[in-house]
Image (cartoon, rainbow, N blue to C red):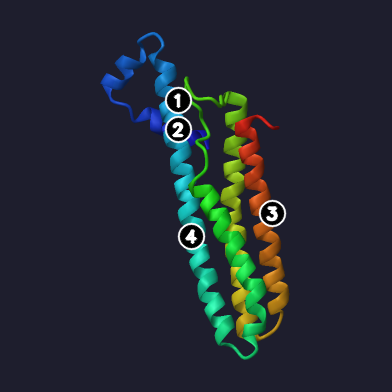
Amino acid sequence: MSDLHNQIASQHTGLDRLIGRLPGFRGYQDATDRRAADRLIREHIGHALHDQYDALMSASKAVLSSPGGLSSMGELGNVQTKMQTFINRVNTAMPGYAGFYDAVKVGPAELQKLYDFDATLLGFVDQFKEKIAALQTAITSKEGLNAAIAALDTLTNEANTAFGARENVIVGIH
């Protein structure tokens, strides 16, 4: 994740580099770059999760239209709600790098933990893709639907718990 910060920092113009040599300004610029990197990471994760949510909604429609599918909609609706909550938390998260005057300070060690959490969150995208594909297979084969929904439910719980840990790093509750 720090590669993204380095990429943003390397794109500065000559004027940016000149201003960066001014005493005290470099730290401000680094904070701005880190905020931009954090925002880009979370936007990417949010978009990727939204794509998976759309796939889940399509699968839900298939479940509903299948014989006996209505009986599974309660559990599947809970999964949808938890996944949407996770996506909303990612999209509206507190920035992972606090500025000079911000009430919450995030130092380099905490920032690295945040990037590690964000890498984990990105891994959840692949896990959702896998579990939703398993749900779609269960719908098509008419076998294992409840197990596929239960696996998605477990994953949504894990994702929301992991995101809670990210927020704890920001507010200092390690």
Asked whether 8 or 139 is in front, the reply is 139
Q: Amino acid at mark 4?
A: His
User: Is residue 44 left or right of 167 when viewed as pictured?
Assistant: left
Residue visible at 55% across and 49% down in the picture: 89
Point out the residue furthest to the bottom here.
Answer: 67
Q: Amino acid at mark 1?
A: Ala
Residue visible at 48% across and 60% down in the picture: 50
Residue identified by numbered label 4: 50
**Of label 4 and label 1, which has the lower sequence position?**
1
- Above or below: residue 119 compared with residue 170: below
Residue identified by numbered label 1: 31
Residue identified by numbered label 3: 158
Point out the residue furthest to the top here.
Answer: 23
Residue 15 position within the rendered picture, expressed as x and y whole percent measured from the top left:
26, 20
C-alpha distance separating marks 3 and 4? 17 Å
Residue 44 position within the rendered picture, expressed as x and y whole percent measured from the top left:
46, 49
C-alpha distance separating marks 2 and 3? 26 Å
Q: Amino acid at mark 3?
A: Glu
Q: Amino acid at mark 2?
A: Arg
